[in-house]
Amino acid sequence: MHRNILIEQIRQKKSYLCVGLDSELNKLPAHLQHQKDGIIQFNKAIIDATKDFCVSYKINTAFYEALGTKGWEAMEATVDYIPDTHLKIADAKRGDIGNTSSQYAKAFFETIPFDAITVAPYMGEDSIRPFLAYENKWTIVLGLTSNKGAADFELQRIRTAEAEQYLYQNVLQTVSKWGTPQNLMFVTGATQASELANIRKIIPEHFLLVPGVGFQGGSLEEVSKYGLNDDIGLLVNASRAIIFAGADENFAAEAQAIAKQYQQEMALYIS
């Protein structure tokens, strides 16, 4: 998906909501858990209920890979069902030596036609370059994550030739030179909202994928205050808070209500 199309969708819907389809089997409504295609039914109902209020869907591939062939089939069916108007993100966190990354890129950009994939930058440029080679596809690089372990590496101070800085800041500066705001996004956790102002100084034009709003406690208001740019530049992900808002046959309607709440709040910040 071209950047301009994504921005157009955001402005039309007054929403930068990304719905995370982390469809863990044992958390599905009871009437779906033991059905052969329960995950597919669940995902389709969630998509139908939320598509008017979001611009993107993010599939955490771990919840599908854990189920083997059945999970991969559910993931493919879900991607096929998501409207082409919505950015389709594979939250796969891949990243390996060049020829291996080439196969990952083929898997998630060709075999299963996602628009974007999350990747880990630890192995350097040659591990990310194969993803960037695809036209109108997005590579979403882990920058500053919202987990406690971010303190182990990302928030460690390092000294470079230019200055002393956090490791994540060096990652943002370095990786941003490998691509452009047309094909590179960065993951920045909502629970690290206080750092967004500094992040915007480093990458003012890039889109940020921001998980951590909802159950993880991130503030949509804070993320929007410090993260929005002239092109909106944010995709705020909410997963469990939306898809598991209800636990019975009425689950889709309850998911819709929460997604609408997010959209209405977002509309206030970009009006």
Image (cartoon, rainbow, N blue to C red):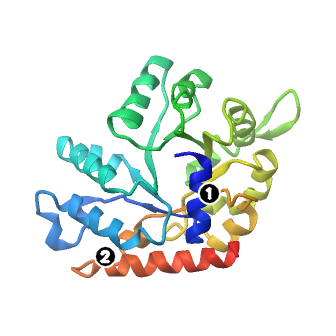
The foreground one among 145 and 205 is 205
In the image, what residue type sits under mark 1? Ile
Residue displayed at 11% across by 57% down: 36
**Numbered badge on residue 7:** 1
Q: CA distance from mark 2 to mark 1?
A: 27 Å
**Numbered badge on residue 164:** none
Q: Which residue is mark 2?
A: 252
Sooner in the amino-acid sequence: mark 2 or mark 1: 1
**Does any portion of residue 144 appear in the rendered image?**
no
**Quadrant holding the C terminus:** bottom right
Q: Is residue 164 left or right of residue 113?
A: right
Q: Residues within 10 Å of mark 2 (few under 14, many from 20)?
A: many
Residue 74 in picture, x, y percent from top left? 23, 50
In the image, what residue type sits under mark 2? Ala
The foreground one among 217 and 71 is 71
For the image, the number of numbered tags is 2
Residue displayed at 69% across by 67% down: 224
The foreground one among 156 and 186 is 186
**Does any portion of residue 82 appear in the rendered image?**
yes
Q: Is residue 6 left or right of residue 64?
A: right
Residue 28 in picture, x, y percent from top left? 24, 67
Residue 226 in picture, x, y percent from top left? 75, 63
Is residue 213 shown above or below 258?
above
Q: Secondary structure at mark 1?
A: helix
Residue displayed at 54% across by 33% down: 135
Circle nearer the viewer, 2 or 1: 1
Q: Is residue 156 left or right of residue 33?
A: right
